[in-house]
């Protein structure tokens, strides 16, 4: 395969909306980024991360000395949890305001970087709260600069304009998407991902597969999103087993990270629909549920229901996983079962019943999917009409295995 010809130590600029430094050793580009901030008069920032990622990955070993060398002051917020809440965003924003932070440095996966993006908005809109932001009560047009140091290969948030936070008291997990929160700079360094636990390796890569499954089949899909989707699925199917077997294999991490980044660009262009709209209520009600696991439990059922409308696209992009599809409507259940078997082979065998959801929970999940702020936009882009009946059927089909 051509991938063996790539020099994974050649750090290149992946030019999307942000400038993303990509490759083994990319973390060292933090010096250039900090120099650019100083040239713009930025000498104070807030670091937003979780309690472990910034240290375990080795990122902080490079970033802290660079901050000191460049004379940039910082305050540290390291309380971000998986599925972050609006209260955490407010807490971090308050710390940033008190310190006079003029930029936000996010270190971690989707949760810390999404929180960093949200904080960047609230540092400009000092009279607003995170709940107001995520209930879409105002439309931000500006934010402080965001620097995204990515430590997982799944969300693609380092190269897109999306962020997510939960409003637990209402059971909401909305998403926002504003041009002002594109990171000014991003770093994608595969060496930071060698310590990812097996489940995070699985779940983040499956997140990327879901991104492209949806972005290639929305009403906003284009040849570009289909192209990126095909390559994402090919790379994940090839390199996820390798990364699970050999966690420190930098080539495997490199191409899973590249798949994640182009998947982020893919859904930044084509947007999302059912899987993400229906997963958000799951992890809003059960905050300990990993986002990627929720997506994995829903994906086969989503494919089953949308396949008859977009069989040619799904057969093409899933060829590495389900190679004998012909792209005809009548093979929807075959396609869904093939994807489910692949997920099982990757070590993801759980369904909604296994994580505590019951059939009695379906009506509430359906209501949340249809009423959570922002999810109506995703549902409106689905290739089939997102009726209450269709949403209910997808949840019920996801309670237990299809095959």
Image (cartoon, grey):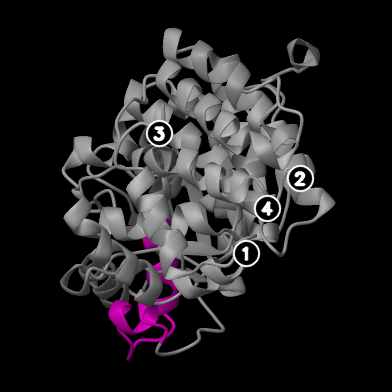
Q: How would you rate the neighbour count of disc 1 (Cα within 10 Å): few for under 14, some for 14-19, many for 20 or more?
A: few
x, y percentage for residue 392?
Answer: 37, 59
Would residue 56 be found to the left or right of residue 249 on screen?
left
Residue drawn at (35%, 21%), measured in percent from left and top?
198
Given residues 328 and 366, the one toward you in this image is: 328
Q: Earlier in the sequence, mark 3 or mark 1?
A: 1
Disc 4 designates what residue? Answer: 217
Q: SS of the residue at dot 4?
A: loop
Q: How would you rate the neighbour count of disc 3 (Cα within 10 Å): few for under 14, some for 14-19, many for 20 or more?
A: many
User: Marks 4 and 1, Cα distance to the nearest angstrom?
Assistant: 43 Å
x, y percentage for residue 42?
Answer: 51, 68
Given residues 379 and 1, the one toward you in this image is: 379
Q: Earlier in the sequence, mark 4 or mark 1?
A: 1
Would residue 239 be found to the left or right of residue 298 on screen?
right
Q: Is residue 123 magenta?
A: yes
User: Marks 3 and 1, Cα distance to the nearest angstrom?
Assistant: 39 Å
> What residue span does the magenta drawing correspond to?
114-136
Quarter of the image for the C terminus: give it. top left
Disc 1 designates what residue? Answer: 39
Circle on res. 226: 2
Image-quadrant location for residue 226: top right
Disc 3 designates what residue? Answer: 203
User: Marks 3 and 2, Cα distance to the nearest angstrom?
Assistant: 22 Å
Quarter of the image for the N terminus: give it. top right
Contact (Cβ within 8 Å) of mark 3 with mark 2: no
Given residues 215 and 88, the one toward you in this image is: 215
């Amino acid at each position: 395969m051509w991938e063996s010809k790539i020099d994974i130590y050649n750090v290149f600029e992946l030019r999307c909306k942000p400038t993303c430094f990509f490759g083994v050793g990319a973390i060292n580009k933090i010096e250039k980024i900090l120099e650019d901030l100083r040239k713009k008069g930025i000498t104070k920032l807030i670091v937003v991360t979780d309690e472990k990622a910034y240290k375990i990955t080795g990122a902080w070993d490079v970033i802290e000395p660079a901050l000191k060398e460049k004379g940039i002051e910082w305050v540290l917020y390291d309380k971000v949890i998986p599925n972050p809440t609006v209260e955490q965003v407010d807490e971090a924003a308050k710390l940033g305001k008190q310190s006079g932070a003029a930029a936000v440095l996010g270190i971690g996966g989707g949760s810390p970087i999404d929180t960093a993006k949200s904080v960047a908005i609230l540092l400009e809109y000092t009279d607003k709260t995170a709940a107001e932001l995520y209930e879409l009560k105002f439309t931000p047009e500006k934010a402080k600069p965001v620097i995204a140091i990515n430590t997982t290969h799944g969300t693609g948030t380092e190269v897109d304009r999306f962020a997510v936070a939960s409003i637990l008291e209402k059971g909401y997990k909305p998403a926002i998407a504003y041009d002002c929160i594109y990171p000014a700079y991003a770093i994608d360094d595969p060496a930071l991902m060698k310590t990812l636990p097996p489940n995070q390796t699985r779940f983040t890569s499956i997140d990327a597969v879901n991104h492209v499954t949806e972005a290639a089949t929305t009403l906003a899909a284009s040849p570009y999103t289909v192209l990126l989707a095909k390559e994402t699925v090919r790379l994940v199917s090839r390199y996820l087993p390798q990364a699970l077997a050999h966690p420190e294999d930098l080539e495997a991490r490199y191409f899973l990270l590249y798949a994640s980044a182009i998947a982020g660009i893919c859904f930044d262009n084509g947007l999302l629909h059912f899987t993400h709209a229906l997963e958000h209520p799951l992890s809003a009600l059960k905050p300990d549920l990993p986002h990627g696991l929720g997506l994995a439990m829903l994906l086969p059922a989503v494919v089953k229901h949308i396949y008859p409308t977009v069989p040619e696209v799904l057969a093409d992009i899933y060829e590495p996983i389900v190679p004998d599809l012909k792209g005809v409507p009548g093979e929807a259940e075959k396609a869904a079962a093939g994807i489910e078997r692949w997920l099982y082979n990757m070590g993801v065998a759980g369904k909604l019943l296994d994580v505590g959801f019951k059939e009695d929970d379906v009506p509430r999940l359906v209501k949340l999917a249809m009423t959570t702020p922002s999810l109506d936009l995703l549902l409106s882009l689905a290739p089939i009409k997102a009726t209450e009946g269709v949403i209910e059927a997808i949840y019920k089909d996801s309670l237990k295995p299809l095959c």
